[in-house]
Amino acid sequence: MLTLAAALLLLAPDDAELFEKKIRPLLHASCIPCHGPDKSKAGLRLDSRGALLRGGDSGPAIKPGDPEGSLLLKAIRQGDPDLAMPPKKAAKKLSDDQVRAFESWIRAGAVYPGSADAIPTKHWAFQPVVDPGSDIDELKPATGPVADRRTLIRRVTSDLTGLPPSPEDVDAFLADGSPDAFDKVVERLLASPAYGEKWGRKWLDLARYADTAGENSDFPAPQAWRYRNWVIDAYNRDLPYDQFLREQLAGDLLEHPTPQQIVATGYLAVARRFGHDTDKEMHLTFEDVIDTLGKSVLGLTIGCARCHNHKYDPVTTRDYYALYGIFASTRFPFPGCEAKQKPRDLVPVGETGDLAYAVVDGRPEDARLQNRGEPAMPGEPVPRRNLELLGGEGISDVRASGRLDLARWLTDPRNPLTARVMVNRIWQGHFGRGLVATPSDFGTRGAAPTNPRLLDHLAARFVAGGWSVKSMHRLILGSAAWRQAQFPRRRLDAEEIRDALLVASGELDRSPGEAHPFPPEKDWKFTQHAPFKAVYESKRRSVYLMTQRIQRHPFLALFDGPDTNASTPQRDTSTVPTQALYFLNDPFFHARSEALAKQLLQLPAGERVGAMHRICFQRAATESERRAAAAFIDAYRAGPPAQSELAAWSAYARTLLGSNEFITVD
């Protein structure tokens, strides 16, 4: 048991997903019928990690960390006829991909958790929210003094808008001696369109937003931008979070739906498509929807229950197919694929003839349980209903898909998960780390909250305050905990770095992006061997860049942008040599540096260094920095070879724009 517990602690989320999605179904389908509790040929059982380590007549079946030394791998490769598994007469040989999955699993430690027979309903996240009645500063006292005013305005501007403050905004705040000076800054930033662009991007990460379909030829979805802009606008309007969710799940089913409420269902429509003929692989698209919904809204890994009951959380296979039936009763837009090139089933919105990449109800019917997650192995029908964990209510109208019921179940104030998950994400957006360190996994395998009373206080305030996200910002930003000087330094996100470069160069186009310049539909002939690929240059904010599924935007990929194929609850922060090379060689970076230098050359020589520091760092240059700048410019001018004034100042601009101070915030 101690060995198993240690292995579970070391199991990374990717390893767990590999086991649950690839290894366990294969063992149950191909191995355990002959090597399980009912039958143990050659003395071998494969239904627990301990059994694998003990092995059978030939010795241990696995050596964790050593695929080549593991008899199980030798058996499934079928190189030795005496060891071949599964026997040819019993089942077909595993594919190369399946064998590689076993190799990866064994190399990662071959963790094989036992069955969880007892449903862990006593887990903290499944209990009702109880407000302890205290405020943030009582529940999380500040550990140091308040940060200086320059630090505060840089921090809050970055937190709320993803942009640096202008030198003029910094000067105004420093000069404002009124007791509500900081509150006025917060209100100004919350009212800025830039707020929705920053916080809308966080939701788009969770919704795995992309402008392409993701199947093997990655067909464009030219209308998807409408959903992206709806999310940004919803944050700017402070659309209550419960309504925000209802419109995304069932905007088309609300009473007298508006065009924008129909567009909101893009949350479902942008689900990834799979394979050569996506019509034949829609079960994988439904899995993607269920998995994304569970993680983004409930903080639960519901997708694990596709093949078997969840091994850790109270989510059953019947729960999974109850939700599956809701989405199988929904008509999704068809973006095109190699087998069927022409898009179809886009949804008309308004009276303009515009089309939305959205969903509507299809033919309503309950889904059949799929044994081992295989559509070709159907079982009994499963009525559409809520998760048993959340009440298990059935749909109210069998003639409808059930999406409107689902939207109501998820936003019921009695639901213990939805509010907790969202306030944790807001806290994470301000502190860099959530009170729950696994923001999309509140299940028994996730991290426990570091301050459960504070989490429940925020969740209770969130619901009582009408699910207002902006009100939660005000609550958190007004706390001494957030304003303290001792605060973790944060590197800007990929989009923030790119946007800050455009701000510094004076070139940022603040207008909202709309459609991308995709090739005309009549020219679409994309295949798996010649898929759609493009990068469209723009000087708008990075949230408006065209994002693909099979090819990440080169800048966003370099600086840890989101994975467009899966819900992204938090960004990684890598430090790799190619990032440093970007600040030396990239044409986009050089162009922004030159544009900044051209601005400075319009000023008297004695004002240039100070102006550049105010633009880049929102502070004055120190005397030592002025001396270093003068020496740098003189040396650059002198060559060899001799350089122009523009080249010299462009080079100096690069030293500031590529500095740690420029791309981090305290």
Image (cartoon, rainbow, N blue to C red):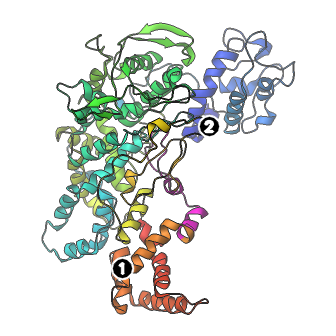
Establish if 534 lies above or below 269: below
Inspect this view and state whether residue 128 appears.
no
Q: Residue furthest left?
A: 178
Horizontal side of 183 relative to 330 (left or right) equals left
Specify the quadrant of the image occupied by residue 277.
top right
Horizontal side of 29 relative to 234 (left or right) equals right
Is residue 34 or residue 621 the one in the foreground?
621
- Category of crowding for the residue at label 2, using alpha-carbon neighbours closer than 10 angstroms: few (below 14), some (14–19), many (at least 20): some
Establish if 357 lies above or below 493: above
Residue 401 lies in the magenta-colored region: no
Q: Residue at 50% of width from left, 29% of height from top?
A: 341
**What secondary structure characterizes most of the magenta part?**
loop
Q: Label for residue 65?
A: none
In this figure, which residue is indicated by the disc labeled 1? Answer: 599
Q: Residue 370: image x %, image y %?
A: 52, 14
Q: Upstream in the sequence, badge 2 or badge 1?
A: 2
Q: Looking at the picture, which amino acid does disc 1 mark? A: Gln
Specify the quadrant of the image occupied by residue 58.
top right
Q: Residue furthest top?
A: 380
Q: Which residues are magenta?
A: 555-583
Q: Looking at the picture, which amino acid does disc 2 mark? A: Ala
In this figure, which residue is indicated by the disc labeled 2? Answer: 7
> Which callout, 2 or 1, points to the residue nearer the camera?
1
Is residue 534 or residue 565 the one in the foreground?
534
Inspect this view and state whether residue 548 appears.
yes
- Category of crowding for the residue at label 1, using alpha-carbon neighbours closer than 10 angstroms: few (below 14), some (14–19), many (at least 20): some
Q: Residue 630: image x %, image y %?
A: 46, 91
Q: Residue 263: image x %, image y %?
A: 29, 35
Dividing the image into 4 quarters, which one contains the N terminus? top right
